[in-house]
Amino acid sequence: MTVAIISDEDRKILLDLARRSVEAASIGKRLPKINFENYSQTLKETGASFVTLTNRGSLRGCIGTLEAYQPLVRDVIEHAAAAAVEDFRFNPVRPEEVSSIEIEISVLSKPEVLIYSGPDELLDRLKPGIDGVILKDGRMRATFLPQVWEQLPDKQEFLSHLCSKMGASEGLWKIKNLEVFTYQVVEFHE
């Protein structure tokens, strides 16, 4: 799996744009305008990102995409705004909250199919702290970024919570071979 190499300068640019996008979304203003001449080739290439917002260590919003379909710079701007006002689990970020919001950006590699023959092999093949995991069963799908391993370091617990997030029973991964994909991320934050 190839994860994009993102320079320190590009990271600063993305974090600044994400911050401006959260601010704009919280007051209903237009998102920052993109002039592609101002950005590096890395930021102009298609990229998949998740933007996670926290407030004093508590999750406040997280939205992203698993498949790259637009320039990375646009992807981060749109997902930062969406994390602020469209994450159905939370009320929209209020303007007075913006200064206490911390922003984390995860740029994803292309997900790859993880082939396994049963639950024991699935557990053996997962790399905690490294792999982001997507579970899919028919139309149901859910993902945890690699950072989630910090809260759920046990592989069985990780998969059970991911099944629950997908809307399935927690033990589904033990009794049925699901479609499993893994990816890695480059993660950076303010």
Image: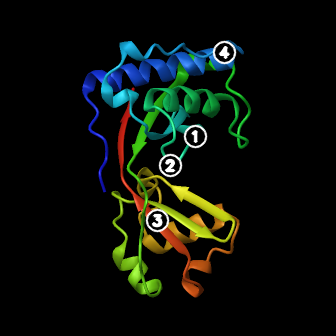
Residue 167 to residue 12: above or below: below
Task: First in sequence, mark 3 or 2: give its number.
Answer: 2
Amino acid at pointer 1: Cys
- Give whichever of 31, 105 is nearer the camera: 31
Question: Could you tell me how far apart the alpha carbons at marks 4 and 3 are, in whole angstroms?
Answer: 37 Å
- Give whichever of 69, 8 is nearer the camera: 69
Q: Any mark on residue 95, and which?
A: 4
Q: Any mark on residue 73, and which?
A: none
Question: Could you tell me how far apart the alpha carbons at marks 1 and 3 are, in whole angstroms?
Answer: 20 Å
Amino acid at pointer 4: Pro
Q: Any mark on residue 62, and which?
A: 1
Residue 37 to residue 47: above or below: above
Foreground label between 1 and 4: 1
Instruction: Report the quarter where the C terminus lies.
Output: top left
Amino acid at pointer 2: Glu
For the residue labelled by badge 3, is the local secondary structure a helix, a strand or a loop? Answer: strand
Q: Quadrant of residue 1?
A: bottom left
Q: x, y percentage for residue 172?
A: 62, 79
For the residue labelled by badge 2, is the local secondary structure a helix, a strand or a loop? Answer: loop
What residue sits right under mark 2 in the picture? 67
Residue 151 to residue 95: above or below: below
Task: First in sequence, mark 1 or 3: give its number.
Answer: 1
Q: x, y percentage for residue 41?
A: 31, 27
Q: Quadrant of residue 32?
A: top right
Task: First in sequence, mark 4 or 3: give its number.
Answer: 4
Which residue is depicted at the point 42% across and 40% down? 106
Question: Could you tell me how far apart the alpha carbons at marks 1 and 4 are, in whole angstroms?
Answer: 18 Å
Which residue is depicted at the point 49% across and 30% down? 76
Foreground label between 1 and 2: 2
What residue sits right under mark 3 in the picture? 181
Amino acid at pointer 3: Phe
